Image: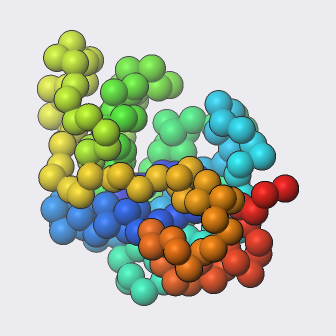
Amino acid sequence: MKVGLFFGSFNPIHKSHLKIAKSMIKWKKLDEIWFVITPQNPQKDPSLLAPSENRVRMVELAVKQYGEFRVEEIELELAAPNYTVNTIEALVNRDPENQFYLIIGGDNFRSLNSWKSPGRILELVHILVYPRGSNEFDSSHLFLANPKIDFIEAPLLNDSSSAIRESIKQANKLTEINDLTKEVKLYIESQELYRPQ
């Protein structure tokens, strides 16, 4: 089975995430997309992150109507600190029958050289890069010509979870936010997530 791995904190998951995933299914003929929910990024403010159980539930609600999408919690179970390469190795060991494709934005591709063991990642998976921000890359980028990396035509991911959180905090009116599915909106409201402290 061809499986796309879409890593993210999904804090919260929004419609652009779903558009990207649908584009990947169509463009690369993937069988499934796994939304890999990540723990706290040490470079980000932990007070901005909803608890992992809330983020898992929001992804479940957002993807439940899509038979080819599923929630993957493996990163929340692995020992910290964790790196993408460790997660991919764990998934390959657990599900060796699958062919995995790592889905990343152009912004993450630009920093791929600085990731832990990027060469090992490319031994294990193909990488699919979708546009995010500028889609121009420095010609000296170490992996630009790697045959296991594909750059796709997909909707530009303009929506950001941070902008959505700020809108909720400022306006306090979820009905005015169009970037969330109805189910995720209702859940955020019921759990009072992203409200001013």
Residue at horizontal 38 percent and vertical 82 percent from the top = 66
Q: Viewed as shown, does residue 96 lie left or right of 85?
A: left
x and y, in percent, of residue 129 in the image: 27, 44
- In the picture as drawn, the residue positioned furthest to the front comes out as 171
Relative to 35, 130 lies left or right: left
Q: Give the image's coloring scheme.
A: rainbow
Nearer to us in this view, 195 or 52:
195
Residue furthest out toward the bottom: 65
Q: Measured along the vertical axis of the image, is residue 139 above or below residue 158?
A: above
Q: Quick one: 157 or 139, which is closer to the camera? A: 157
> Which residue occupies 15% across, 26% down?
145
Q: Is residue 104 above or below residue 170?
A: above
Task: Quadrant for the C terminus, please.
Answer: bottom right
Up the image or down, 32 lies above or below 67; here it is above
Which of the pair 184/150 is nearer the observer? 184
Q: Which residue lies furthest to the right in this view?
A: 197
Residue 51 higher or lower than 93, as above or below: below
Q: In which quarter of the image is residue 57?
A: bottom right
Residue 123 position, x and y percent, is 33, 34
Tell me, yes or no, if residue 33 can be seen here.
no
Q: Which of 65 and 72 is in front in this view?
A: 65
Inspect this view and state whether residue 132 appears: yes
Which quarter of the rendered picture does the N terminus lie within? bottom left
Q: Which residue is drawn at 60% across and 75% down?
A: 174
Image spot of residue 94 (x, y percent): 52, 57
At x 38%, y 27%, the residue is: 112
